[in-house]
Amino acid sequence: MEGKRKMIEIEELMSATFSKRRKEIVGDQPLIGDVMTRWPAMFCERQVSQ
């Protein structure tokens, strides 16, 4: 149950920061390693498939 709550929280936070992440990635064009460090949840299977 705790794991499911954490995933829901991560999904809500990722949704709330979508425009910031997009602007940062498109504008700054950071290296993938930097994106993985800054936004690790983007590389979770649940986030990739949404």
Image (spheres, rainbow, N blue to C red):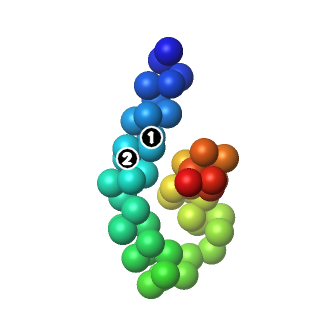
Please indicate, yes or no, whether residue 40 appears anywhere in the rendered image. no
2 and 1 marks in contact (CB < 8 Å): yes
> Is 47 left, or right, of 26 in this rendering?
right
In three-dimensional space, the C-alpha distance between marks 2 and 1, rounded to whole angstroms, equals 5 Å
Where residue 15 appears, as percent x and y from the top left, is 39, 53
Where residue 10 appears, as percent x and y from the top left, is 45, 40
Q: Amino acid at mark 1?
A: Ile
> Is 39 left, or right, of 20 in this rendering?
right
Where residue 1 appears, as percent x and y from the top left, is 50, 15
Where residue 29 appears, as percent x and y from the top left, is 54, 81
Q: Residues within 10 Å of mark 1 (few under 14, many from 20)?
A: some
Question: Compared with residue 4, is residue 15 higher up or lower down, i.e. above or below?
Answer: below
Give the residue drawn at x 60%, y 45%. 46
Q: Which mark is residue 10?
A: 1
Question: Compared with residue 49, is residue 9 higher up or lower down, i.e. above or below?
Answer: above
Q: Amino acid at mark 2?
A: Leu
Q: Which mark is residue 13?
A: 2
Asked which quadrant contains residue 16, the reply is bottom left
